[in-house]
């Protein structure tokens, strides 16, 4: 019989139980469960995600049915439906946010020195959002449309090492641009931003902080061309211009020049117009 460490225990080996206990101590439950520690709760929910358990009954059946194996997996507590239901309802979400922070910082230390592949000396970040649909019956507070519920996940990805540098979760009807007020801004670094985040006042704040951004220009934005530079059309470039926003609100939000680059993808034929503060 193989009595070596299980694959699951190796997956969780990067997280010390004392770190979870420390996070749980900062945000205690009204009545702590002695039979199910914060670490056991976290491990059980990770197990549920990795094994596609769809109910508390399914988690209980797997982990209680093989107690010896669950112990070797690192789960010491009694994982019952009652214990899980109570912990899921009463354990503060900030405990899991703190666990995520510990793992993210550890991953950054391990992979933060990965050599750049794009020829950039500075770090490159990518910002985008995705909508996670929920059951309206279970999450009535997350109503998004008339008969739908959702939350919106905004993630700032460090492209060099493929690790999240920032993440936030909000109601589905919250506009993406508000996340530009929350992301960490590092002078000299590059931010590629989906055009759903196009807000000139917030982009100007990035510019003043010394960061560079690249986004796509929306149709209908009023501007005039200050200067044009020659381009190599054989690689898909169509124009490289210095522009200035011409509307009153636009000039008030972003009073300095911007760079507009038009490009046609030679494989798909799609025309793309980029906007950046990098000259």
Image (spheres, rainbow, N blue to C red):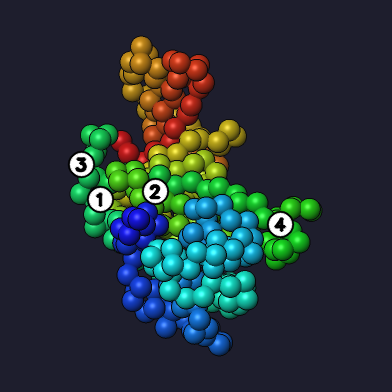
Q: Is residue 24 left or right of residue 105?
A: right
Distance, label 3 to label 2, CA atoms, is: 16 Å
Q: Is residue 49 above or below residue 240?
A: below
The picture places residue 244, in percent across and down from the top left corner, at: 44, 37
- Determine the CA span between mark 4 and mark 1: 37 Å
- Per the image, label 4 sits on a secondary structure element best described as loop
Q: Residues within 10 Å of mark 4 (few under 14, many from 20)?
A: few
To which residue does mark 2 refer?
A: 157
Q: Nearer the viewer, residue 227 or 165?
A: 165
Whether residues under marks 4 and 3 lie with C-beta atoms below 8 angstroms apart, the answer is no
Residue picked out by circle 1: 111
Q: Tag on residue 115? A: 3
Residue 4 appears in which quarter of the rendering?
bottom left
Q: Looking at the image, is 16 positioned above or below residue 231?
A: below
* Residue 95 visible in rendering: no
Q: Earlier in the sequence, mark 3 or mark 2?
A: 3
- Give the number of the disc on residue 97: none
- Which residue was labeled with disc 4? 135
**How many residues crowd around disc 3 within 10 Å: few (fewer than 14), some, or many (20 or more)?**
few
- SS type, badge 2: strand
- Residue 67 percent across, percent down from the top left: 48, 68
- Where does residue 111 sit, x and y in percent of width and height? 25, 50
Question: Closer to the observer: label 3 or label 1?
Answer: 1
């Amino acid at each position: 019989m193989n009595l070596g460490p299980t694959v699951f225990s190796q997956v969780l080996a990067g997280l010390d139980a004392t770190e979870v206990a420390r996070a749980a101590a900062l945000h205690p439950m009204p009545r702590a469960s002695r039979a199910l520690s914060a670490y056991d709760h976290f491990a059980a929910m990770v197990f549920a995600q990795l094994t596609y358990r769809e109910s508390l009954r399914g988690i209980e059946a797997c982990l209680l049915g093989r107690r010896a194996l669950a112990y070797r997996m690192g789960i010491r507590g009694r994982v019952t439906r009652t214990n899980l239901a109570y912990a899921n309802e009463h354990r503060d979400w900030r405990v899991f946010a703190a666990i995520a922070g510990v793992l993210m910082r550890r991953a950054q230390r391990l992979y933060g020195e990965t050599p750049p592949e794009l020829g950039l000396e500075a770090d490159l970040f990518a910002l985008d959002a995705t909508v996670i649909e929920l059951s309206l019956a279970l999450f009535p507070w997350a109503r998004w449309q008339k008969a739908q519920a959702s939350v919106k996940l905004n993630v700032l990805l460090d492209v060099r090492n493929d690790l999240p540098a920032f993440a936030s979760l909000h109601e589905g009807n919250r506009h993406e641009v508000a996340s530009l007020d929350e992301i960490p801004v590092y002078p000299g670094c590059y931010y590629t931003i989906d055009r759903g985040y196009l807000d000139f006042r917030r982009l100007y704040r990035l510019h003043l902080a010394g960061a560079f951004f690249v986004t796509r220009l929306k149709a209908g934005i009023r501007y005039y061309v200050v200067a044009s530079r020659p381009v190599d059309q054989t690689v898909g470039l169509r124009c490289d211009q210095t522009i200035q926003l011409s509307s009153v609100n636009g000039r008030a939000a972003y009073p300095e020049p911007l760079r507009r680059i038009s490009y046609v993808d030679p494989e798909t034929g799609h025309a793309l117009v980029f906007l950046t503060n990098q000259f």
